[in-house]
Amino acid sequence: MFGRSFNLFRLFGFQVRADASWLLIAFLVTWSLATGLFPFVYEGLSSRTYWLMGVLGAIGLFASIVAHELSHSLVSRQYGMPIKGITLFVFGGVAEMDEEPPRPAAEFWMAIAGPIASVLVAAGMSFLALVGRRYAWPLWLNGTLGYLGGINLLLAAFNMVPAFPLDGGRVLRSALWHWKASLKWATRVTSSIGSGFGLLLIIMGVLSFVGGNFIGGMWWFLIGMFLRNAARTSYQQLVVRRALEGEPVRRFMQREVHSVPPETTLSEFVEDYVYRHHHKLFPVVENGRLRGCMSTRRLKQVPREQWATRTVGDVLEPCSEDNAAPPDADAMKTLVSMSRNGTSRLMVIDDGRLQGILSLKDLMRFISLKLEIEEDVKGRVEAMPGPGG
């Protein structure tokens, strides 16, 4: 989902990160508050004051988003769901989970925790603004507190729209899951609603753009695109997880492997292996034992004029979690690791011996075939006439 990110701080054991896109949105929020909202609502203040309010408002907004996502993370941890961290990005923030909730109740409380936290923050900010008006606090401070109260209430309301993957969509999914006892069906329904809601926002964005509201239209359009894509991706991820759940890596590995002897020169490696078999990673085997792996990435680190004299054994890479896995490893966790590391092939090793190669292409082919068969069987069953039909 994210591009390049950087760490900000740790909070209650969770790493809070910011996607590179967050820098852009931080500036845009500050600029829009300092030059648009605050001068419109509170006239007669200095430009310096408006920019101070803009900076404080942006900091408060992102602190509110962290509080919202932190509430999800804390509840998730109580239900045993691992959270990798919290990432701020261009459309807000997300608590990153590698697993689906274990049961509907866990889904419900995890989802509802975010809007509840936002409502509590809104109430707190609004109360402070009331106190500030009573005791004549500076207008710039009261104005910023009032903005944070309103924006947190808006954040809670928007997130409770019953469109997956918004919090309201997750609440709806938990209810449908409890009703039908099928997470897959509940996810398909709520993801469809989420995709439709995203399309509605896209249409609103286009209409706003045509009507002259360029900035507002652009944001509606982009948020709609993001939600529509996230809804589709969420369902696809669940389907993949269900297809690979509980399956060992050995089921999907190729046992016939093109291994490279360590004495092979780099020139021979390129001509006889890379160009012939079209892979980026090859195991290096000597006397039946795995010595390591040779990749095109490692090859490119060696000057081309040395390819004729240097051998694969000179430059091979050792086995690690990034390029190898045991045959009993969970296929789903291995797929997540491969996707995270950008690895398309993985060596399957048992007691130092090469057992096979796991290919991302083979995993995807299995998932595609399983879905095609299951959907075809499902369609045939649904088309069968009932008793007396």
Image: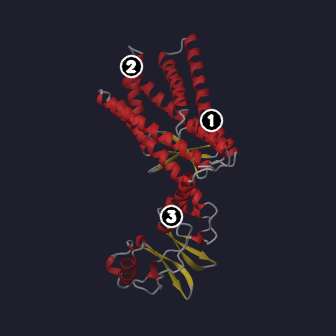
Residue 175 image position (x, y, % from top left): 64, 39
Q: Which residue appears farthest toward the front when viewing the image?
A: 388
Decide which of 168, 64 is in the foreground and name it: 168
Residue 33 position, x and y percent, is 41, 26
Q: Does 384 sit above or below residue 131?
A: below
Which residue has dot 3 on it?
Answer: 369
Whichever of callouts 3 and 2 sits on the residue coming sooner in the sequence is 2
The residue beneath circle 1 is: 112
Alpha carbon distance from label 3 to label 1: 36 Å
Tag 1: amino acid: Ile
Q: Mark 2: which secondary structure?
A: helix
Residue contact at pointers 3 and 2, CB within 8 angstroms: no
Identify the mark nearer the N-term, 2 or 1: 2
Q: Which residue occupies 59% across, 69% down?
A: 249
Q: Is residue 207 left or right of residue 199?
A: left
Frontmost residue, 222 versus 26: 222
- Structural crowding at the residue carrying mark 2, measured as other residues with C-alpha within 10 Å and reported as few (<14), some (14–19) or many (≥20): some
